[in-house]
Image: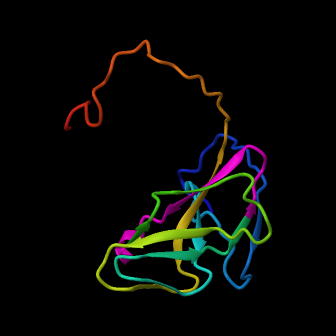
Amino acid sequence: MTNDKTPTATVKKITLRMKLFDKTLPKPEYKSNGAAAVDLYARVETKIPAKGIGYIPLNIALQLPENYWALISARSSLHKRGLMIANGVGVGDYDYCGPNDEYLAAVYNFTNSDVVIKKAERVAQLIVMFREPVEIELADDFDAPNRGGFGTTGKT
C-alpha cells in the first residue's frame, strides 16, 4: 500500500501471535497506510435479537507481547446495521492468551428487528496498545481546583 500521506518516521513494529479458528477467512490486516486498527471478521453467521445482546465470534485468539493489551471497538459502519458494542469497547488483557480464548464482540441490537451478521462480515476493529502499569496512591484531597463536571468547557 502506498499513498501520498505515508508517514516518513520509522514506526516500531511488534510481533503479535494470532490464531485463526477458521482459516478460510481473511487474516486481519490494515486496510490503508494510515489505518489505526485491523478489521475483524465474524467467524459464523450470528443473529442478534431485536433490543437484545448477541456475541459474535471474531475468529482470533491472541498472544500479546508482554505489557500490551488489545482494544476491540466497533467498525464505524456497525451502527448502520442497528448494532453497537454493548460494553462500549472490549479490553483483551495480556493474560487472555489460551489457544481457545477466542475474542468475541458483545453487541446490542437497538432496532425492533433481528439483525443477522453473516460469516466473514467485518464487524469490529483491533488495536494493540502498550500497557504502562500504575501504582495507585490514595488521597483525601488534590492540589487543583474543581472543574465542575461534564461539559464545563462550554457548549461550542
Left or right position of 47 against 14: left
Give 111 or 31, whichever is nearer the viewer: 111
Specify whether residue 76 is painted magenta: yes
Tell me the residue at 51%/69% (across/down): 106
Give the image location of residue 80, x and y in percent: 35, 73
Give 89 or 35, whichever is nearer the viewer: 89
Q: Is residue 143 above or below residue 106?
A: above
Please say whether residue 125 is visible from this viewpoint: yes
Give the image location of residue 2, x and y in percent: 61, 59
Q: Is residue 148 above or below residue 88?
A: above
Left or right position of 33 against 50: right
Q: Quadrant of residue 50?
A: bottom left
Query: In the picture, which quadrant includes the C terminus?
Result: top left
Q: Quadrant of residue 1?
A: bottom right
Tell me the residue at 44%/16% (across/down): 141
Furthest residue to the front?
140
Query: Over which residues does the magenta segment extend?
Result: 62-82
Q: How is the model colour-coded?
A: rainbow
Tell me the residue at 67%/50% (across/down): 69
Q: Is residue 132 above or below residue 52?
A: above
Q: Is residue 71 above or below residue 108?
A: above
Tell me the residue at 29%/82% (across/down): 112
Give the image location of residue 102, x and y in percent: 69, 70
